[in-house]
Image (spheres, rainbow, N blue to C red):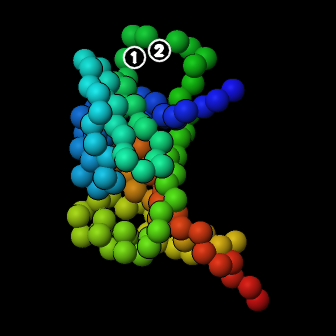
Amino acid sequence: MNIVSSSVSLTVADPAASSRFFTSHLGFREILAGEDFIALGRDDGAVDLVLVERDLARWQPGQGLADVIVVFAVTDLAAEYERLRGEGATITIPLRREPWGELLMQLTDPNGVAIQLIEWISPITD
């Protein structure tokens, strides 16, 4: 198998609201839009995102609704945190350091999609 690209499909109530969030705060751009979806991409190594409008008429029992967290590893997370705070992005987990060597924060878009930004740093040693 040779995977040449990747995308994550997120089912949301309002794809346009999520698109505005990802393009305004996280540097994505719309690469394709249809009647009930918007595809987003970036020019770096980030996975493409496909925002699909939730259609309750097509939902089948047993499909479930999974909790998904989109995670992006970044550099200079402290600066990104300050930028996002200044832009008024909804920050649901403030910047924090984990003992295993991870700096992280979490945002939530208007549809409830959780986005974690992380930066790998030195672990805390005793």
Residue placed under numbered mark 2 in the picture: 59
- Point out residue 9 in the picture as x, y percentages from the top left corner: 46, 30
Q: Is residue 116 above or below residue 50?
A: below
Q: In the rendered view, does 82 fall on the left or right side of 124?
A: left
| Displayed quadrant of residue 88 | bottom left
| Left or right: where 66 falls relative to 77 | right
Instruction: Give yes or no for contact between labels 1 and 2 (Cβ–Cβ under 8 Å).
Output: yes
Element type at marker 1?
A: loop
Dividing the picture into quadrants, the one containing residue 41 is top left
Circle 2 residues within 10 Å: few <14, some 14–19, many ≥20: few
| Residue indicated by mark 1 | 56
Extreme-right residue of the structure: 126
Image location (x, y in percent) of residue 98: 62, 72
Q: CA distance from mark 1 to mark 2?
A: 5 Å
Closer to the camera, 116 or 90? 116
Please provide percent x and percent y for residue 96. Answer: 52, 73
| Mark 2 residue type | Trp
Quick one: quadrant of the C terminus?
A: bottom right
Q: Residue at x 27, y 47 (%)?
A: 23
Image point 24% across, 70% down: which residue? 86
Q: Is residue 11 visible?
A: yes
**SS type, badge 2:** loop
Judge left or right: residue 99 versus residue 117: right
Q: Is residue 112 visible?
A: no
At label 1, the amino acid type is Leu
User: 29 or 51: nearer the eye?
Assistant: 29
